[in-house]
């Protein structure tokens, strides 16, 4: 059994994009604020790359959010 779930990673990326765009931030602006490369944000949002906890925390804090907000989305886990 794999612990990786590409569908979950894509859903996380979609939530990050939703939160970022609601705050009217570009990837470049958020990246500069968080110390994260815009390409990394793109990979998380579009390609479903799984971010590290440190990256999630940096992105959340740059947007003045609790990190759990980036993990707060609906997702159906398959067994």
Image (spheres, rainbow, N blue to C red):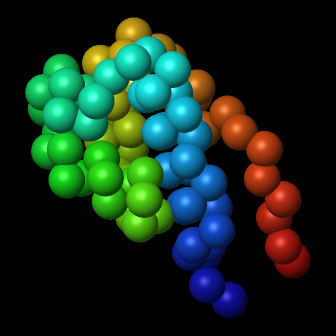
Residue 22 in the image: state x and y as whole percent.
Answer: 51, 20
Quadrant hosting residue 7 = bottom right
Q: Tag count in the figure? A: 0
Residue at horizontal 52 percent and vertical 27 percent from the top: 19
Farthest residue in the bottom direction?
1
Kindly tell me whether residue 34 is visible in this rendering.
no
Q: What residue appears at the point 81 percent right and 64 percent down from the top-left corner?
A: 77
> Which percent across, then down, holds residue 28?
18, 34
Quadrant in the picture for the C terminus: bottom right
Q: Quadrant of residue 55?
A: top left
Q: Is residue 13 visible?
A: yes
Q: What residue sits 46% from the left and 64% below the top?
A: 48
Residues 6 and 45: in front is 45
**Residue at horizontal 50 percent and vertical 50 percent from the top:** 13
1 to the left or right of 16: right
x then y, percent, for residue 74: 78, 44
Residue 35 picture quarter: top left
Quadrant containing the N terminus in the rendered view: bottom right
């Amino acid at each position: 059994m794999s612990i990786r779930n590409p569908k979950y990673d894509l859903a996380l990326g979609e939530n990050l994009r939703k939160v970022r765009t609601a705050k009217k931030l570009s990837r470049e602006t958020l990246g500069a604020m968080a110390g994260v490369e815009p390409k990394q944000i793109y990979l998380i949002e579009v390609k479903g790359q799984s971010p590290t906890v440190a990256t999630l925390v940096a992105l959340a804090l740059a947007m003045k959010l609790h990190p759990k907000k980036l993990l707060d989305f609906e997702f159906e886990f398959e067994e």
